[in-house]
Image (cartoon, rainbow, N blue to C red):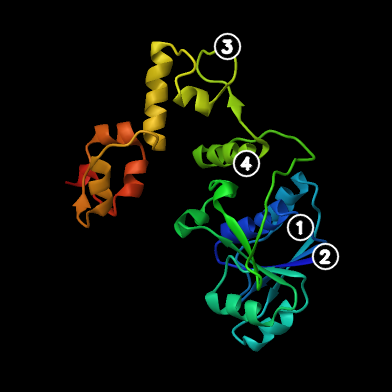
């Protein structure tokens, strides 16, 4: 089975499109990445990620340039084309010429799609198949090998979201003797020490579970805003995502 992916200058979007297809049950023998120009990076990391899931396709890229008549011919050589990354014109060519399946991963807040796979919960993504506009279901995939990894904040969020595909996720928190779920913590079903409660309150504020009325004004204003250090401590980087334009306090 041959899977086609539209290439992008952002490797993360190409990676995400490929992973959406794998989590939708596609097990390709070959992955063909269609690009306008030679890619600036290798796809070694893609192969490593797929290998963890027991998927071992041959991965190659095809440079088609700006002669768009070539794109339709190239698309006819694959069974599925995922047009999530790449340009609109190549997506249109795929939709109008491909004899196989054409798919697009729809995310309402498109800007969130430029993050590591899993950062956006897969439950919020609709994998649409043309021309029938059918939604293709995605489900959890188990790794076939294990190892150690160091995760940053974004990676930790992605890992948690992917685990939710298996059901309720439990984790150790503070000094609690047994694992708990996020829902149990949010609904005050467990008793925390004063120190753990303060830490948890900070976490849920920064994650957006607790929001202030003033945040609505921040999101709507067109003005450049400057925030006191305490605001950053209280809300974390969430305040930067809310505000359209900010000015560092040290530059005032």
Residue at image position (70%, 43%) is 140
Task: Tell me which corner region of the image, top left, top right, bottom left or bottom right, holds residue 234.
Answer: top left
Quarter the N terminus occupies? bottom right
Mark 1 near mark 2, Cβ–Cβ under 8 Å? yes
The disc label shown at residue 1, or none? 2
Estimate the spatial distance between the alpha carbons at disc 3 and disc 2, rounded to whole Å.
49 Å
Q: Tag 4, which secondary structure?
A: helix
Mark 1–mark 3 distance (CA, rounded to whole Å): 41 Å
Q: CA distance from mark 4 to mark 1?
A: 17 Å
**Residue at 60% from the left image edge and 15% from the top image edge:** 178
Q: Is residue 157 left or right of residue 14?
A: left
Q: Classify 114 as above or below 60.
A: above
The number of callouts visible is 4
Q: Secondary structure at mark 3?
A: loop
Between 122 and 252, the residue placed more toward the observer is 122
Residue 141 position, x and y percent, is 73, 44
134 and 205: which is toward the camera: 134
Query: Which residue shows up at 45% across the image and 56% down it?
Result: 109
* Callout 3 crowding tier (Cα within 10 Å): few <14, some 14–19, many ≥20: few
Using the image, tell me which numbered label, if any, was put on residue 177: 3
Q: Secondary structure at mark 2?
A: loop
Where residue 152 appears, as percent x and y from the top left, is 53, 38
Q: Quadrant of residue 231?
A: top left
Q: Earlier in the sequence, mark 4 or mark 1?
A: 1
Residue 188 or residue 89, whichever sits in front = 188
Residue that numbered label 1 is attached to = 26
Residue 227's disc is none
Query: Is tag 1's residue or tag 3's residue first in the polypeptide sequence?
Result: 1
Q: Along the polypeptide, which appears first: circle 4 or circle 3?
A: 4
Disc 1, SS: loop
The numbered disc on residue 162 is 4
């Amino acid at each position: 089975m041959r899977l086609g992916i539209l290439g992008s200058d952002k490797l993360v979007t190409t990676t995400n499109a490929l992973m959406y297809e794998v989590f939708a049950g596609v097990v390709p023998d070959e992955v063909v990445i269609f690009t306008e120009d030679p890619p600036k990076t290798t796809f070694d990391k893609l192969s490593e990620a797929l290998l963890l899931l027991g998927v071992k396709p041959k991965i190659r890229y095809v440079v088609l340039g700006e002669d768009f008549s070539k794109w339709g011919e190239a698309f006819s050589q694959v069974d599925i084309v995922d047009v999530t990354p790449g340009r609109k014109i190549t997506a249109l060519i795929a939709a109008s010429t491909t004899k196989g399946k054409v798919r697009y991963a729809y995310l309402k807040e498109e800007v969130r799609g430029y993050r590591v796979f899993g950062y956006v919960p897969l439950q919020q993504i609709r994998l649409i198949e043309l021309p029938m506009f059918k939604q293709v279901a995605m489900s959890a995939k188990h790794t076939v090998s294990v190892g150690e990894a160091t995760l940053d904040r974004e990676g930790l969020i992605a890992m948690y979201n992917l685990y939710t595909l298996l059901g309720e996720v439990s984790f150790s928190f503070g000094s609690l003797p047994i694992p708990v779920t996020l829902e149990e913590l949010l609904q005050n079903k467990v008793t925390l020490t004063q120190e753990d409660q303060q830490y948890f309150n900070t976490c849920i504020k920064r994650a957006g579970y607790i929001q202030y009325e003033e945040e609505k004004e921040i999101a709507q204003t067109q003005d450049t805003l400057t925030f006191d250090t305490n605001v950053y401590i209280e809300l974390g980087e969430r305040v930067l995502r809310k505000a359209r334009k900010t000015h560092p306090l040290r530059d005032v």
